[in-house]
Image: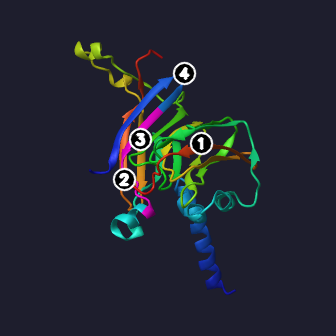
Amino acid sequence: MANKITAVKVKIKNDVATAKMVFSHPMMTYNQAKAKTGNSDDANFITHITAKVGTEEVLDISTSQFFSKNPIFKFQFKCGTFKIGKKLSAREKFNGMTRDASEQGDLLTIVATDRKGNIYEKSVELASKKKR
Amino acid sequence: MNRRNFLTFAGSAIALSVLPMNLNAKDYRELKKDVWTAHNIDDATKALYGMKTPIESDQIKIDVPKINSSGAAVPVSFSTTIDAKTIALFQDANPESAVAVFDVNIYDMKKYDVKIKMEKDGIVMVLVEGTDGKIYMAKASTQVAAGGCEG
């Protein structure tokens, strides 16, 4: 299975955004690599994760091989200064409602780098159903 | 020191001082290489924060299940109210100690949930480098029924 950022979800409440991300990655440790291929240098795991809204960094973390396989990671950040878009409910979407360009929020971009130098990226919009 | 040598020296010094400014992100794997190869928590702490002794603090909260059926994914959630510069997550069950180093920014709520691997029973430790220069720590022990690193 291809390695990727599987999903990023953002919930916003009282100017605090909770972002939850799921990766598809074997996160192979040196010991596991040695048992599997005989070469501990085959180990591959995510080494760095950053999250940005526009140019502002909201998360910066250096990680090691001891994150679980297909890791799940959750963090919170203050989003009061960012633009939050309006999320349409299922009914509004069903009724064919569309949003104005002005109702679109800023994008949260997650970038992850692994030991082999591959870069994974995913963006989600900061949006909430409630009126602000 | 002759002039030519001085110029190259000055040039490289400027290049070195400019380079980290361009990189917004702090890669602790490059900055502190020893942390990631340290085999116990003490060594990792020394490699990351120098010789400072961590102070135990109740302003750091760690939530780990007491007993895990599998060590492949141990959910760890932790938070702190200390004004922090960096936060480090260590454990002593695996061959190396370091799990993650967080660089805290102004938007950060300093509350994280993460799943980690643990080979055997051990201690999960969170270290916080405060903006006052002191190191705070809190730890929690957990039991693992089946190790997660052999897979």
Which label is found at residue A109?
3
State which chain disc 4 sits on.
A
Q: Residues within 10 Å of mark 1 (few under 14, many from 20)?
A: some
Kindly identify the amino acid type of the residue bearing the numbered disc 4: Asn
Q: Is residue B76 visible?
A: no
Q: Which residue position holds label 1? A: B105
State which chain disc 2 sits on.
A
* Mark 4 element type: loop
Kindly identify the amino acid type of the residue bearing the numbered disc 1: Asn
Camera-near label (2 vs 1) is: 2
Q: CA distance from mark 2 to mark 3?
A: 22 Å
Kindly identify the amino acid type of the residue bearing the numbered disc 2: Pro
Q: Residues within 10 Å of mark 4 (few under 14, many from 20)?
A: few
* Mark 2 element type: loop
Q: Which residue appears at 76% of the width and 56% of the height?
A: B52
Q: Are marks 1 and 3 on the same chain?
A: no
Q: Are the residues at dot 2 and dot 1 in contact (C-beta closer than 8 Å)? A: no
